[in-house]
Image: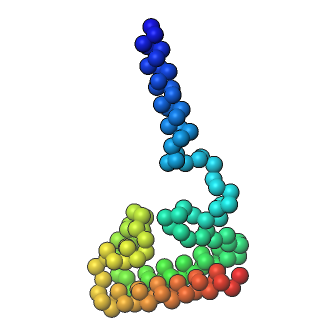
Amino acid sequence: MFRYLAKWLFLWVVIVGTVFLSPDIVNALPNQSQANITPAANNTRVMELTPRQRQMMQAVNQGRNRAISKVLEESQQKKLIKLLRGGDSLNQAVDKLKLSSEQSEMIQAIIQLYYLKMKAVTVNF
């Protein structure tokens, strides 16, 4: 009986000691001083946008998507949509498509143009 209780006591001491003394255990509460910053691995700020900015960014994204779809053939458009819904970023999805050099250059130019437009939307406010 004493041996059984000693094992359980030892187990509880190990568990409690691990929880309180381990520096790797993260507190479940968010750090209040870093509330507007994403995790350290990404190291980018989370943007707080006004509803107008969000609407303008959505319009910029839709314009970019229309411009890209004009460059692609129908089968390429379908494959691009499938890749994007699969979790790839726009650049990753474009890289996976089999594009001619002309199409690739056009799409990269469109992406850069709309990136600058997106930047203008966020800087002006």
Q: Quadrant of residue 70?
A: bottom left
Q: Is residue 57 above or below residue 22?
A: below
Q: What residue is shown at x 70% (from left), y 76% (from top)?
A: 52
Image spot of residue 41 (x, y percent) = 49, 64
The answer to whether residue 59 is seen in the rendering is: yes
Of residues 112 and 16, which is closer to you in this image? Answer: 16
Image spot of residue 111 (x, y percent) = 46, 84
Image spot of residue 16 (x, y percent) = 54, 32
Question: In the shown orientation, is residue 60 left or right of residue 72?
Answer: right
Image spot of residue 18 (x, y percent) = 50, 37
The answer to whether residue 77 is seen in the rendering is: no
Of residues 71 and 17, which is closer to you in this image? Answer: 17
Q: What residue is shown at x 44% (from left), y 83% (from top)?
A: 68
In which quadrant is the C terminus drawn?
A: bottom right
In which quadrant is the N terminus drawn?
A: top left
Of residues 125 and 106, which is closer to you in this image? Answer: 125
Q: Is residue 75 above or below residue 117?
A: above
